[in-house]
Amino acid sequence: MQTAVVTGGAGFVPSHLIDRLLGEGLRVVALDNFITGHRRNIAHLEGNPAFSFIEADVSEPFEVEGPVDYIFHMASPASPIDYVKVPLETLKAGSYATHNGLELAAEKKARFLLASTSEIYGDPEVHPQAEGYFGNVSTTGPRSCYDEAKRYAEAAVMAHHRARGVETRIVRIFNTYGPRMRLDDGRVVPAFIGQALRGEPLTVFGDGSQTRSFCYVTDLVDGIWRLMQSDCADPVNIGNPHEMTIREFAEAIAQATGTQTGIEPRPLPKDDPKVRQPDITRAKTVLGWEPVVPFDAGIKETISYFSEVVRGGAVSKS
């Protein structure tokens, strides 16, 4: 039985990744310090003999006993609210934690995958964004602790790959949604759904013309697993290229939830990207991957999850 280590394992995307890895027949060791993750995301795995959990801050050196075949470095705060609350921890997740994971990979002769982000492209001047675009990122803005941490993490991964021969993979994750997101994390999917379910106006920043591309979490996880199994050491975009304006997305959520509370405009935050759409040519060519979950089906599952959260009052870190 092969063993995978998943940092940030109690988070939204990592918890779904763990489900996939267990389904593939792997033993999984997850680590998390619960800054933004939550135990409820992995509670269903209690008693599974193939799963074990270590409560740890991977920004500090850590050890995993026994052989390790794969390391998925997923640990990092990943929402605008997090950047304000825990900027130093966000920087450490991209720097110290990445190095610690790479050291473990070198020691165990394991393959290492970095969960990077579309945010490394910043407020892009190229559209859609392909992996060869170097980005337009502010080093001092309110989002810089996340954007620059991930850019540094990519540089660290490639340095270990070139200098030490560590087998590495880099996935650039675009906007992802699905069950187990935190209702209060500030991203547009939980924000709009939560507001709609509570009968509140949907708060749209700016005029709503900025765009995002939404990928359902199981599609993302499939792309991550395919990338880890591939021979591609270059960064790969994984996301859904179907582009929507924020206003269109708000209208879709209002229709899906039956809300008639309307839209409330808010000032556009500093450095908020005006457009976001992945060029997934590399993923299609190298991995044979493209998203398959229709938006209507994915958003239905997500609304169903958040309906239970709102009814149960489990707003924080859900």
Image: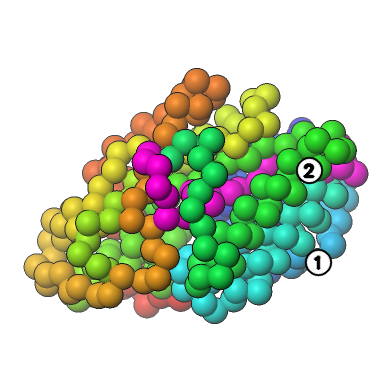
User: In this view of the protein, which residue sits in the foreground, 118 or 8?
Assistant: 118
Residue labelled with disc 1: 60
Q: In the image, is residue 45 above or below residue 56?
A: above
Q: In the image, is residue 156 above or below residue 92?
A: above
Q: Give the residue furthest to the left.
A: 260
Residue 278 pos. (x, y %): 41, 39
SS assignment at label 1: loop
Kind of residue sitting beneath label 2: Ala
Which residues make up the magenta segment?
105-128
Cα–Cα span, label 2 and label 1: 20 Å
Q: Is residue 260 left or right of residue 41?
A: left
> At 13% across and 66% down in the image, what residue appears?
259
Protein image colouring: rainbow
115 magenta-colored: yes
SS assignment at label 2: helix
Question: Is residue 129 visible from the viewing direction of this image?
Answer: yes
Kind of residue sitting beneath label 1: Glu
> At 57% across and 65% down in the image, what residue appears?
139
> At 18% across and 74% down in the image, what residue appears?
264
Mark with earlier residue (2, 1) = 1
Q: In the image, is residue 262 above or below residue 281?
A: below
148 magenta-colored: no
> At 70% across and 47% down in the image, what residue appears?
155
Residue 180 pos. (x, y %): 45, 59
Q: Is residue 211 left or right of residue 114?
A: left
Mark 1, other Cα within 10 Å: few <14 / some 14–19 / many ≥20:
few
Q: Quadrant of the N terminus?
A: top right
Q: Select label 2 or label 1 by which is in front.
A: 2
Residue 219 pos. (x, y %): 44, 38
Residue labelled with disc 2: 159
Mark 2, other Cα within 10 Å: few <14 / some 14–19 / many ≥20:
few
